Image (cartoon, grey):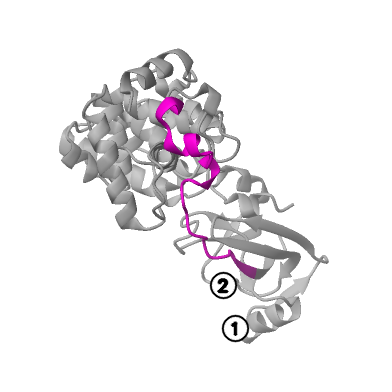
Amino acid sequence: MDIKRLEAWYDEHHRKLLFRETKDPYQIWVSEIMLQQTQVETVLPFFERFIKKYPDVLTLSKTDEETLKKDVEGLGYYRRFKYMLKAAQIIVDQYNGIFPDTYKDVLSLPGIGHYTAGAIMSIAYNEPYSALDGNVIRVLSRYLNIDDDFRVEKHRKKLDQINQSYIEHATPYKYTQAMMELGATICRPKNPKCESCPLSEHCQAFELGIQEQRPVLSKLNDKKEFSYITLKIYDREGFIYLRKRTESLLEGMYEYPQVESESIYDCLSQFEEEGIILDMISDQKTYKHIFTHQIWMMKVYEVKLLSKPKVDWIRFDQKDIKDIPMAIAHRKIK
C-alpha cells in the first residue's frame, strides 16, 4: 500500500470535523463512543453540545446517568453512555482525572473495545494500534480483494492483523483517520468514487471491476417485529404515568407503559385482573419505530387511571416530560 500517498490525500481532502481538529484523548473518546452505529452528520451537533457542557473527564464524572441520557436523547444505543459515565468515574478515581495513555489501560475502561482503544491510541497518542471499523474493512477488502465473510470474527481478526502491519509503517494518527475518511467519502458501499481514490492504482477489486462485491457480509437475520398496546395513562388530576425501562434495550430511558398485544381489550382485561382499572379516553393512533434489530408497531391509546397504579409506573406532571430522557420511539408519540 502507498501509505504516503494515502496520508497526503487525507491532509488535502479530509472533512474539517470538530473532533478531527484535536488530539485531546477525552474528546476523541467521546467522539468515538458517539460514532458507534451512528452517522457523522447525526453526531456533530450532539458532540458540540456535549463538549461545551462536559469539557473534561472530571465534569462528566460528576453528572448522573439520567441527566447524561437526556443530553444524548436521540442518538440511540443508550447503554454506551451508561458505560461512558462509569469510565469517566474510573478515570477520576484511578488516574487522577487524566485519560490513560497505554493501550492496556484504555482497553480496560467500560464500553471500550479493541476498535475504540486502537482509535484513541493512534489518533490521540500517535501510537501504532489498529482501529478496524466498517469503513476500514471495506477499503482493505477491496484493495486486497479478500472474499472472506466479515461477519465472521476470525476473518475480522485476520484483517485487523493486516491493518496492524500497515499502521506500523505509517503515521498512526493520519493513517487511522485517512482509512476511516476514505471509506466514508470515497470507498463507499454503493457507487464508490474510484477515480478520486489515492489507492485505486493498486486496488485489486477496482482492477477486476468487482468493487461492490466487497466486502462479503452474510445476510443478517430479519428484524423481529413486536406489536404493542402503548398507553398514555392520566389520573384524575391530569398527571401522567411513565415507566423507566430496565430492559437492556433503552435501559434507563422513560416510556409510556406498553404491553405486547394487538388488542386494547385484552390489555385492559389483563390489568383489571391485577386490580388496575383503566378507562378509555381516545381511540388509537398508530406509530412505527425501526431499531437495528427489531421493529416496534405501537397502537397508542389515552386512558384514565381509576385505581392505584402499577408499582413501576412513575407519576409526572405533563410539562416535565420534556426534561427527562425518553427514547425517540416514544418521544414522537403525540
Secondary-structure class at tag 2: loop
Q: From this view, report whether residue 61 is shown above or below residue 199.
A: below
- The residue lying toward the viewer, choosing from 163 and 212, is 212
**Whether label 1 touches label 2, CB < 8 Å:** yes
Please determine whether, in this image, residue 11 is positioned above or below residue 56.
above
Q: Nearer the viewer, residue 143 or 16?
A: 143
Residue 32 in the image, given as x and y percentages of width and height: 39, 36
Whether residue 201 is in magenta: the answer is: yes
Within 10 Å of disc 1 (Cα), the crowding (few <14, some 14-19, many 20+) is few
Assign a secondary structure to mark 1. Answer: loop
| Residue marked by disc 1 | 274
Q: Which residues are magenta?
A: 199-226
Question: Measured from the top left, where is residue 224 in percent x and y?
Answer: 58, 67
Which disc is residue 310 wearing? 2
Task: Report if residue 121 is visible in the image.
Answer: no
Residue 130 left/right relative to 139 = left
CA–CA distance between discs 1 and 2?
Answer: 9 Å
Q: Quadrant of residue 115?
A: top left
Can residue 313 be seen by looking at this rendering? yes
